[in-house]
Image (cartoon, helix red, strand yellow):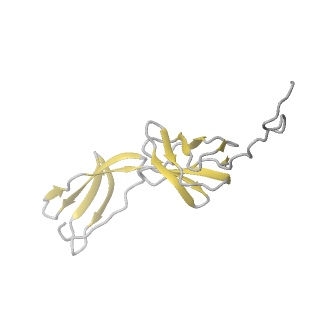
Amino acid sequence: TEALASVVVTEGMTTLCSTTANALGDWSCTTVALVDGAHSLVATASDTAGNSLASSAVSFTIDTVAPNPIIVTVPSASFVTNNSTPLISGAGETGATIEVKEGTTVLCSATASAGAWSCTSSTLSEGSHTIFAEATDAAGNLATSSNVTFEVDTTLPNAPVITSPANNTNTED
């Protein structure tokens, strides 16, 4: 931009801010508050002789809203599984990145598609586990699910013992 040029930033026919470039031609201005959604801004510089030139449009999206609530549907609360790497699934905003965590440990991750997501957990130890899911949308907004507690039980039960009749015996019954 030319030194001391007048710069006006617009969106369509709306002026968002204006300023004067410094002696080096550098400039900046703070726009009026923009609402969530797609925006396309153009900066137009005008010099004292009346010459003006517009920039190429710069397009971007403002998204200050957290993703839709995220829900863990599988496993359900109090679920008991013999699989130490269970499938975990749920519902969330399409396109959001989902991380399933136990405390600060990420167990698996997925991208929600058509409002659903699923991932296979890393190996879990025997016992109770409390997990939750976090969804991050394209703008970095975060939503967190409620906790879900379930149990991994991979221990085989004791083998049953037949006590009667005794092995290799004859019986009248």
Q: Residue at x 87, y 25 (%)?
A: 172
Q: Tell me the quarter of the image containing the C terminus.
A: top right
In the depicted view, which residue is nearer to us: 60 or 68? 68
Q: Left or right? Give the position of 114 relative to 9.
A: right
Q: Residue at x 25, y 61 (%)?
A: 7
* Residue 12 percent coordinates (x, y): 28, 45
In the depicted view, which residue is nearer to us: 42 or 3? 42
Q: Count the marks: how many?
A: 0
In the depicted view, which residue is nearer to us: 14 or 147? 147
Q: Left or right? Give the position of 144 relative to 116.
A: right
Q: Tell me the quarter of the image containing the N terminus.
A: bottom left
Q: Left or right? Give the position of 114 relative to 8.
A: right
Residue furthest to the bottom: 23
> In this orientation, does residue 58 appear?
yes
* Residue 61 percent coordinates (x, y): 37, 49
Q: Residue at x 21, y 75 (%)?
A: 24
Residue 6: quarter of image? bottom left
Residue 29: quarter of image? bottom left
| Above-or-below relation of 57 to 80 | below
* Residue 45 percent coordinates (x, y): 20, 60
Q: Left or right? Give the position of 171 relative to 43.
A: right
* Residue 118 percent coordinates (x, y): 50, 43
> In this orientation, does residue 136 appear?
no
